[in-house]
Image (spheres, coloured by chain):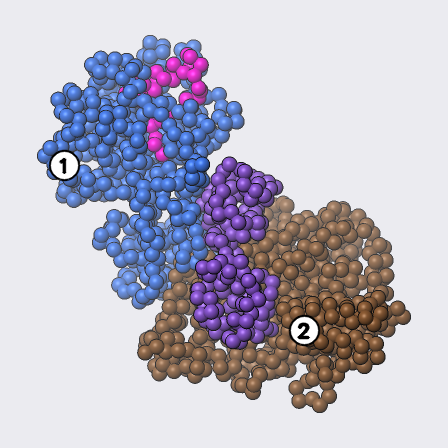
Chain colours: A purple, B blue, C brown
Amino acid sequence: MATCSCCCGEDELTKQLDKIIEPYRGQPGGLIQVLTKAQELIGYLPKWALISIAKGLGLSLQDVYGVVTFYAFFSLIPRGRHKISVCAGTACYVKGTKMVTKTLREVLGIKPGQTTPDSRFTLEVVRCIGACGLAPAMIIDGKDVHGRLEPEQIPQILEQYA
Amino acid sequence: MITLTIDNQKIAVEEGTTILEAAEKLGIKIPTLCYLKDINVIGACRICVVEVQGAKAYVPACVAPVAEGMVVRTNTPAVIKARKLILELILSDHPMECLTCVRNQNCELQKLAEAFGLTEIRFEGEKTSYPIDNSSPAIVRDPRKCVLCRRCVAVCTEIQTVNAIQAQERGFNSLIAPAFNEQLANVECVQCGQCSLVCPTAAIHEVDDTGRVWEALADPKKHVIVQTAPATRVQVGETIGAEPGSIVTGQMVAGLRRLGFDKVFDTDFTADLTILEEGNELLQRIQTGGTLPMITSCSPGWIKFAEHFYPDLLPHLSTCKSPQQMFGALAKTYYAEKAGIDPADIFSVSIMPCTAKKYECTRPEMKSSGYQDVDVVLTSRELGRMFKQAGLDMANLPEEEYDAPLGISTGAGEIFGASGGVMEAALRTVYEVVTGKELPNINFTECRGLTGVKEATVQVGDLPVKIAITNGLGNARKVLDKIRAGEADYHFIEIMCCPGGCIGGGGSPIPTDTEIRLKRIDATYTEDERMALRKSHENPAVNELYQEFLEKPLGHKSHELLHTHYTKRNRYQEEEC
Amino acid sequence: MKSLDELAKIRDSRRAALKIREGVPSATEKAHIMMCGGAGCISSKCTDIVEAMKECLAKNGIADQVQIILTGCMGPCDMGPVAIVYPDATFYRRLKVKDAEAIVEEHILKGNPVQRLLYRTPGAKEPTRCVHDIDLFKKQKKIVLRNNFYIDPTSIEDYIARDGYAALAKALTQMEPGEIIEEVKKSGLRGRGGAGFSTGMKWGFTAAAKGSPKYVVCNGDEGDPGAFMDRSVLEGDPHSIIEGMAICGRAIGSEQGYVYVRAEYPLAIERLSNAIDDARRYGLLGKNIFETGFNFDIEIRIGAGAFVCGEETALLTSIEGKRGEPRPRPPFPANAGVWGKPTVLNNVETWANIPEIILKGAEWFSTIGTEKSKGTKVFALAGRINNTGIVEVPMGTTLREIVFEIGGGIPRKKLFKAVQTGGPSGGCIPADYLDTPVDYDSLGALGAIMGSGGMIVMDEDTCMVDIAKFFIDFCVDESCGKCSPCRIGTKRMLEILERITTGNGKEGDIELLQELATTIKSTALCGLGQTAPNPVLSTIRYFRHEYEEHIKEHYCRSGVCEFKE
């Protein structure tokens, strides 16, 4: 994952990003779509990518940054290899989100929004993931739902993710 | 026409009128905070809520259009209670520094709090705590005092099309700032200060340099001189409560002397000089096939805008420095020599209706005298503050004259303050220089007024000179895009950064709105007509300057002292490769 | 596909192939196993069970005689993974991989349903085999979720077999645009997103509005914490949304639709996106649909995580690629919506109703429900309740029926305390009002709202002050920050609730909360702000004593709040 890219256009990611931008060139309306795809490509939204996107779509960097910071889905910082999203929907809250978050904080030693120093996990507390039947639940890497969580299961669950 | 009832009074207004406007017609002033007529109409602060019969919630008067048969109540106890609570909430997220605040007694939030009799804030909790940004030499951004009304964003984006600040983050963490909360000095902000002019509080304000001036004035070793911009004399009066449009030239000069300035000079003098240099540059470009159209370069906000947004068009800019910087360069050379003062001892202050001038005087190339040519720029607002601190009641001061020689000027220099003034002054001179005949009518009224883009063709001898004049950067863009597209056949374009020209500059007294701008413009032309001389080339002091020092327009010394160059800048916070 | 005949041909041939799902035994196929592929069942590894079943079928040499379909959410998430085996419509629950063999070898090969995997009504001696005989389902009425037991959501032909796109065909060939709008008006359908505005009237305004082009938008930014109805529809029956929107396109004169789906629903996005592609391939989207000259297409816009984008003006701004900040109305989207053009905006559930209304008529639809609230409503039941999941009931069903009969009551013999409807915009309704019929007006009168359909049940272990804090915390997080009452007001409410729940509450805090709540409700810019105080107001209204206990006695009867002295 590139942490730096300059305007020289040699970087492979830069080229791929340009491909994402191309269909939306000069079209500010495509901003959210481009940002979504750019984050898919790079894993997060580094400043150089925002600059390329602003230039490509004909926006100021302020406009782009304003949108990025408005939506929870976008991240300006690199994330861990695995993203743990603890559901904070009402059903989960009623059934113990607090306990799940507390356990994860203790086990991982980080707060929600942070990434472990070894870049293994990023911990997030998110809006309802729509698995209310499994409350309390968390979702790892956007696909693996772990439901009906008990604190003592959590370390074992995390072991599955290297 | 739509008929409605407001506070039991019937009124008929045109369709599309807002409740706020309709109420105003009845003499009911509904309080507002975020609202800025024609510019920021977003219904965000909710101070202007009113009761509309049948509506399930209160309605924001500033955005809600009237409807037939509508029954509005603007001041029921419930409405007033709601407004008061909203104010209390806003203040609960505001630093209570009113007494030490730069906007004390000229703050819209403070006025509302006073009007609503707010005596207690019952909420103690988190307050916005983003750091103050004082990176810029011109403008301070203090997010703690921001009420998120977004007037600044509207002005920066819609009027100036600079877009250097935008709403960032969301909810309670919302912030108006450049991307990444970068400092203003490091982004494409042109330092025009229009944001500071519309800010209802002190969330964006000019850098206060009065302390540095007081210090210099108190320093016996310093010879402290001051220049006053053309627009200052038609606006400084407002800082002490005079009616907009009051002309206070003589009192301002008297006041400056009483503050302790050793010499009180006038930027109008170098405005006249600018006409001679720039007029000749234009003629030379026309005669030698130089880059046309040529664009004026007096307005430092416009210069920075061109550098960031139209770097490809920089060759179109006149190489003339602005009158302020011409003055600065001459003060520490010509004047120093003439007065027999070591330029190292001269402290050069200017009074400007402008925040960008503060930035301009710090540009590295503005040191042609060997020293920083202009040491400190004060805005009209800061001068007003100094007068107050010194207990000077300008209204009761006698009218005094500027000092010679750098205080001698013509009406042509004076009108630099209004949009179209530089063009008119240039035409007055170019016409007579080229044709050798006296102008039949000195008033080029086609140059005047608030219209965003003014165009005309003026016959100068055999040559039909095509001109354009713009004020406000959004209007400049229209003309610049034409040049880029190769569709502009103008010879000469005047571009002023701020709406209305310098009389509406970002350093002007607060408030400054369209109506006030028009009054200052009227005053400017009144002052022009009062002058004995009204053409730059007739300024005797300027002519003496050429004879004694510069030799001729565009001569060697002129190039050294009066002309400059520009720098291409990017607009995306990019680091150099 | 160009003609109605072709549509009929596909429908008939596919319907014949799917007879088995209607209970008609087939000569060539032994069974169709419908495995629930809702989020809950998927996360309980239902796909592993499918694999195991396939293996077992192959081992027994009958792989070609049994179809296994992954459906949309069937509803009873708490019992997942669940499956229905046709033709006998046997309902299985709490399946494990090791159960695959029993189902294949006992049920499918020998015809003996696996007793231990059947549903047992609490207290009943015998299990109930057939899905149609189970109380939990019998009390429901499926219009929106009409297809979730029956179709493969990735198959457009399955949808067509269930009369899919017949309503569009009818609207295009037998109805004038004005008639379509009249029909929707007459049906009495009200927006299922929460506010309950008449859908037909909305369409009428947009049709009459000046300006073109016009747009049709589906709000799939389901954001209420504790609500997953729209997800079930998008994942289980995506074509119903496409068809509903196309019908509206015809009615108002629009050729372009947008579906705004939240990024947190990747499967819904995938299913919908495939469905749109299929519809295009079948000529049901695109140019000259059914050779009537009608053009209509749909694009997906992905919401990037902002609850406020469920508010219509915010959603429209977000479609334009900007910060999803609401703006004052008027102008309403009917006059100035996406790109400033006339726009109809309805939520997923509303759209799913449209094809049925057009096909079966307004009269049929308006016989269901109450006088002012017609049709059905889908709810996501969650919290302290036995049968967590999705249910669809006729409007007018009482809360008691939903919670205790369909929902199976409270687990572990705990006492019911309240049911929360409408998510962060709604309110908590106590036991005294359990016999209230669920409709827009009755819930509104209780200080709650219908909302989009989240229904969270709370028992004696739930602290109502803590719940109020939870919802306000959510609103503080999701406030866009544009208007001052919501931006600062909700924050201050949260701070007061925080001090109450940690033992630092003061005399007068309840009144201060009420004052803030009332002002925010009446002055905030958008629906989010105007309804944000509802959970606080309704808990103060019905559970004031709990607030007082916290403040005066530093006592939390549910044992949730920790008081630091």
Seen from the viewer's position, the closer of residues C140 and C203 is C140
The residue carrying mark 1 is B217
Mark 2: few, some, or many residues within 10 Å (few <14, many ≥20)? many
Tell me the number on the disc at residue B28: none
SS category of the residue bearing label 1: helix
Disc 1 chain ID: B
**Residue C368: percent from the left, percent from the top?**
69, 72
Residue C189, quarter of picture? bottom right
Residue B50 lies left or right of residue C6; in this view the side is: left
Secondary structure mainly formed by the magenta segment: helix
User: In the rendered image of this protein, does residue B434 appear above or below residue A96?
Assistant: above
User: In the rendered image of this protein, does residue C358 appear above or below residue A154?
Assistant: above
The residue carrying mark 2 is C81
Q: Extreme left residue here?
A: B220
Residue in the picture at 58% in, 72% down: A147
Give the magenta-colored segment's residue range.
Answer: B273-302
| Marks 2 and 1 share the same chain | no
Disc 1 marks a residue whose amino acid type is: Leu
Residue B541 lies left or right of residue B65; in this view the side is: left
**Residue B104: percent from the left, percent from the top?**
24, 51
